[in-house]
């Protein structure tokens, strides 16, 4: 019998991964630095008022 495992990835983690991937593909940042910067980028985007976005 094999046990199927499903890994749950939050929407936030998906967004962080998307931004981190864009940063690594378009810069010389490493994975860790890109992820740390992605968290800051998403924080800033999430705190921009809807009218401004």
Image: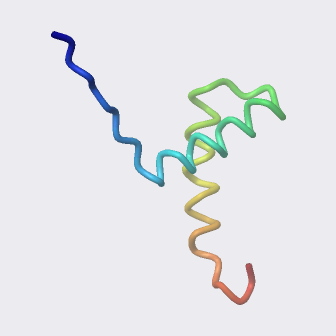
Quadrant in the picture for the C terminus: bottom right
Left or right, 52 with reference to 32: right
Residue at the extreme bottom of the image, as rendered: 51
Residue at the extreme left of the image, as rendered: 1
Q: Residue at x 47, y 53 (%)?
A: 11
Position of residue 50 measured from the top left corner of the image (x, y, whole percent): 65, 85
Position of residue 37 measured from the top left corner of the image (x, y, whole percent): 62, 44
Asked whether 2 or 30 is in front, the reply is 2
- On screen, residue 1 above or below 9: above
Image quarter for residue 52? bottom right
Position of residue 40 measured from the top left corner of the image (x, y, whole percent): 58, 54
Asked whether 52 or 10 is in front, the reply is 10
Q: Residue at x 58, y 40 (%)?
A: 17
Left or right, 24 with reference to 18: right
Asked whether 17 or 45 is in front, the reply is 17
Residue at the extreme right of the image, as rendered: 26
Q: Residue at x 57, y 69 (%)?
A: 46
Position of residue 5 measured from the top left corner of the image (x, y, whole percent): 27, 26
- On screen, residue 3 above or below 36: above
Q: How many marks?
A: 0
Residue at the extreme front of the image, as rendered: 1
Left or right, 42 with reference to 8: right
Image quarter for residue 42? bottom right
């Amino acid at each position: 019998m094999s046990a199927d495992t499903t890994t749950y990835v939050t929407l936030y983690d998906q967004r962080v991964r998307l931004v981190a991937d864009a940063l690594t593909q378009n810069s010389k940042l490493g994975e860790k630095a890109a992820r740390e910067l992605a968290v800051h980028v998403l924080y800033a985007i999430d705190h921009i008022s809807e009218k401004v976005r």
